[in-house]
Image (cartoon, rainbow, N blue to C red):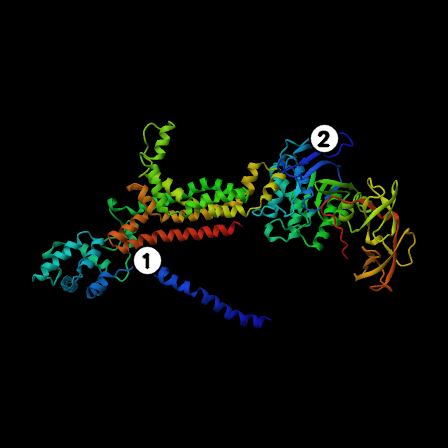
Amino acid sequence: MPGSHARSAAPRRWWAFALVAPLLLFLLASFVLPVLLMLSRAVTDRELHTVWPESAAALRQWDGRGLPPDALAHEVARDMITARQAGTLNRVANRLNYDMVGSRSLLYGTADMLLSGVPGDSVAALARIDPRWGQPGIWAAMRHADGPFTSHYLLAALDRRLDNDDRVISVAPEQAVFANIYLRTFKISALVALFCVILGYPIAYLLASLPDRKANPLLILVLLPFWTSALVRTAAWAVLLQTNGVVNHALQNIGLIDAPVQLIYNRLGVYIAMTHVLLPFLILPLYGVMKGISPVAMRAASSLGATPLRAFLKVYLPQTLPGVAAGAIIVFTLALGYYVTPALVGGGADQMISASIAFYTNQSLNWGMAAALSLLLLVPLLLMLFAGRTLARTVPA
Amino acid sequence: MTSPGQPLVEFRGVEKRYSADARAAVTRLDLTVERGEFLTLLGPSGSGKTTTLMMLAGFEAPSAGDILLEGKSLADRPPYKRNMGVVFQNYALFPHMSVAENLAFPLGVRKIKGAAAKEKVDAALALVRLDGLGDRRPDALSGGQRQRVALARALIFEPDLVLMDEPLGALDRQLREHLQAEIKRIQRALSLTIVYVTHDQGEALTLSDRIAVFADGSIQQIGSPEQIYDYPSNAFVAGFVGENNMLSATVVTRQDRQCTIRLPGGQILHAVATGDIAAGDDVVAAIRPEHVQTGDNQPSRCNTLDARIGELVYHGDHSRIRAELDGGGSLVIRTPSRDGIAVSDRLPIGWCSDRCFAFPVPDITGVSTGNRI
């Protein structure tokens, strides 16, 4: 009866929800929320907002043209003194330094002069302490940082910044590093995914076409490194690939090379180690798809007159494409965020965007920048996953 | 080219072992397929019928012997050069292609493209009565429709020979009977040569011009459906094709094709003698349920027995009786009437001696000896 069915469905739904609720709450609290909070730092600006609330409010009132009114300068001077005494000037100084190099010394120098009794109640008075107060740069920097939201970090992650008139301009060429690192990150990831497809496809095919008795031991050989830490495997590659390592010795002994070649601390080392570390992520989904393909279809193709090559290209290969796509997307996604392997076996010019994120997170403590870089890695990735899903839906499994 | 009277296909002493020390899957196989005939390989699973078909298609290589197509050995010819249409049990359609693309696949291989290919695809769809479904994906078709597509795909390139490996095995009974008629219609219309593998003896009897009954890797009997059904050559065929009562007995006398046998209860019966049975041998006597006559109205019988009705099952158009013989043993009787008979009644039964066969005791596995009602 439909009525009783509907009545019984509602409690069952609640039950189901109650069963997943602990995990859901755990994930929300320990993963989703921290990630969102971290990412929100890419677009929020809290330093001036919290340390200099009055100045920040006054900055938001100002139209931003040229130099500010004296009332605003007076407000800033008062906040500078208060913050210097409270020991919080550091936060504002660091923030303004991101926008305008030299802001830090300017603020500390000016604050100390103000504390010693030098007047600073107008733009002109401040300019007498340091001429930079008489130029638009520092005022624009403060206005850009007045919060609560900012485009500074995202623009910086794209090698862009706002000029004094709020136009988006490119940063100086010697400071433009991120576009390069992003391109490098995507290129390395795409090539690693490609190498994994080239190397992994035949292995998956072998595993799928052997009888289980023979395939299972081989599968263990694929899984064993899969279960081993990526750090351990990368370190092992460092041993193998070094100048006096096993690979160089072997190549010399068989006479392929006369002197040791540089296999590590360059791009080649990154490709070798990352391809090896990520290979199981391609083989396993592809193997799963290949296992599901009926071997009779190949016989049918053969009976219909197709040569083995034609049968493979027209019948087998198209059916494996969803597996190739799934595996390649997984490898590409993981490669985008790879940190340990490039750090250990790559050179300075082989570092990927995750190294920059780690630098801003751990060393310069500029979390806004780290969040912006992460966001710019995450968004294209999500777009690609979505595109991949749409693609997979059009190809019947 | 081909001499008149030459068979289309000839198996000469073919044997197949999957490994050197394994039991032969097929042994001492000599078989011919004539042009235009519908030949069925019938047998239980593991009897070698599918292996035989796969060797003909080229997916398995014979361990010994040779297979000839139009007098030429197929030994070095791979499957894709044999020009045989194969219909597989689980359809083996290409899931990533539409129905029309599936049908066009063998045409593309043969460089038939464009309008000519489309014309053939449409004609093939019409042949299996699937007009207008060319754009569907196989997974949007029913089982019966998929098998029609598989059939059309195996026919579209006009193969010399069509091989079918239990093509209707995955379908329900009604659909199976419907498609049997369909296959027969198409075979007649196109004068196809078909080699058909099945374990369903009813299907074999309905469709075939000739049936080869397989057991234990070799052919037990080959002949028309009537020959196979009415004159089984051994106990296996008698038990596998149609229904038969199998009675243990001992030979009393034998003269050429005639013999007399004694049942455990002492009853003496006349039967047709087969093989090299002689007086004193243990045999099995086979009699079909529909050949046993009951009551006093028995026109031309020469074997009469007294039995007791052990069980009676009403089937609508007929009834089935399990008759218990004096001295042990029972047999199943199929009778159109059920008037005036009841369980535990005594019932005189009998049959013509040319309907009863005495076979040597079989050494083949899979012969049913229990008489189920």
Circle 2 crowding by C-alpha within 10 Å: few under 14, some 14–19, many from 20: some
Q: Are marks 1 and 2 in contact (CB under 8 Å)?
A: no
Question: Can residue A18 be seen at all in this image of the molecule?
Answer: yes
Residue type pointed to by label 1: Leu
* Image spot of residue B169 (x, y percent): 67, 50
Q: Residue furthest left?
A: A117
**In the figure, residue A251 lies in which quadrant?**
top left
| Distance from Cα at disc 1 to Cα at disc 2 | 78 Å
Judge from the rendering whether residue B313 lies leftward or rightward of residue B126; answer left or right.
right
Q: Nearer the viewer, residue B364 or B300?
A: B364
Q: Quadrant of the N terminus of chain A?
A: bottom right
Q: Of helix, strand and loop, which one carries label 2? A: loop
Label 2 sits on residue: B71
Depth-wise, is mark 1 or mark 2 nearer the camera? 2
The mark found on residue B92 in the picture is none
Q: Secondary structure at mark 1?
A: helix
The answer to whether A204 appears left or right of B104 in the picture is left
Residue at 35% x, 51% y: name it: A377
Pointer 2 chain: B
Residue at image mark 1: A39
Q: What percent of the width, then of the height, locates residue B42?
A: 73, 45
For the residues beneath circles 1 and 2, the answer to whether they share a chain is no
